[in-house]
Amino acid sequence: MKKTFNWGVIGCGNIAQLFATDVQTIPGANIYAVASRSLEKAQCFAQANGAAIALDSYKALLEIEKLDAVYIATPHVLHAENSIMCLNAKIPVLCEKPLAMDTRQVRQMIAAAKSNDTFLMEAMWTRFMPPLGKALEIINSGAIGELNSVKADFGFAANFDPEHRLFNPALGGGSLLDIGIYPVFLALLLLGKPEQIEASAVLGKTGVDNACGILLKFPEDKIAILHSTLMSNTRTEAFIYGSDGYIHIHSNWFQLTDVSVHLNATDEVQQFEFEKNSQGYSYEAEEVMRCIAEGKRESESMSHAFSLQLIETLDAIRHKAGINYPAID
């Protein structure tokens, strides 16, 4: 009989609940143990998701046997600390994006994974979504010709609360690390490493970036125009332009959505739709499970090297835009 894959969860907020719900749609996977700084919150989360164990400290999770991997969903500023703690205990880690606050922390996490010979992956769920997979397939087929630009946005009108993680600088708040990371991720995935970075931010009452505009230039005159904001509900679409046509990943482009392909020569529009059997977190969870079953220490699709390039780019963007994080600056 196939062994059940036991997930642990650190941090019991909204995103952890979405992940836990999706894990339960995967055959042979379950939520086994959860940890929060509040025992009541951990117990409620465990009850809602059928977890056998609820704990009131993150460190206590290290003592739990039968764990196959831990999903870390704490605030950004705790990602490095929580991940390294698990890696040093040789527990495989799927850590929410951003992998950490800056390049230095990400390097420390990768070093911990390598020294402990233990799996680590950044939870960039969009990387494993069928819509993005279809877009990559179309690009690789040559249907839209040579890629030359990417345009993507992610924005929503957030209710202002200075203590909320989105607006609290001590928690790594602001649009860039929370949602701006998605357009930046897409640009890097498709166009490689930027050779020139320009960025400007709108800083709010608490000092975090309420909005950020980003222009990336790549070799061979390729560009990306990117936007994130906590001030407005944007179209949340992505456009991938080539010499012979373009791909439109519809709203919300970073989730399970539709994809259309527009070809210049024929004015033909091809439409692709995808089944929505989960919120979309199941795909990244399945990638982790596959990699671990195959004895791998990182994912080829979301590698350590790519996560490092992503955080390096985010560091450069925030320095250009004048965005500071008290936890590291």
Image (tube, rainbow, N blue to C red):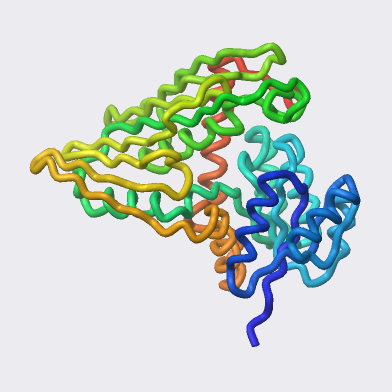
Q: Residue at x 53, y 30 (%)?
A: 180
Determine which quarter of the picture holds residue 20: bottom right
Which residue corresponds to the image point at 54% horizontal and 53% vertical from the top-left? 279
Q: Nearer the viewer, residue 23 or 49?
A: 49
56 to the left or right of 297: right
Q: Is residue 329 visible?
A: no
- Residue 245, horizontal then vertical, whole percent: 19, 39
Residue 141's spot in the image, x, y percent? 23, 54
Quarter assignment of residue 251:
top left
Q: Position of residue 60 (x, y in %)?
A: 89, 56
The C terminus sits in image quarter:
top right
Q: Residue furthest left?
A: 266
80 is higher (above) or lower (below) than 3: above
Looking at the image, residue 78 sits to the left or right of residue 198; the answer is right
Q: Residue drawn 26% across and 35% down? A: 241
Q: Residue 31, can we see it?
A: yes
Is residue 87 found left or right of 28 in the rendered image?
right
Taking 33 as reference, is 136 above or below it? above
Q: Quadrant of the N terminus?
A: bottom right
Q: Quadrant of residue 186?
A: top left
Image label count: 0
* Left or right of 246 in this view: 287: right
What is the x, y in percent for residue 78?
76, 39
Residue at 53% in and 47% down:
305
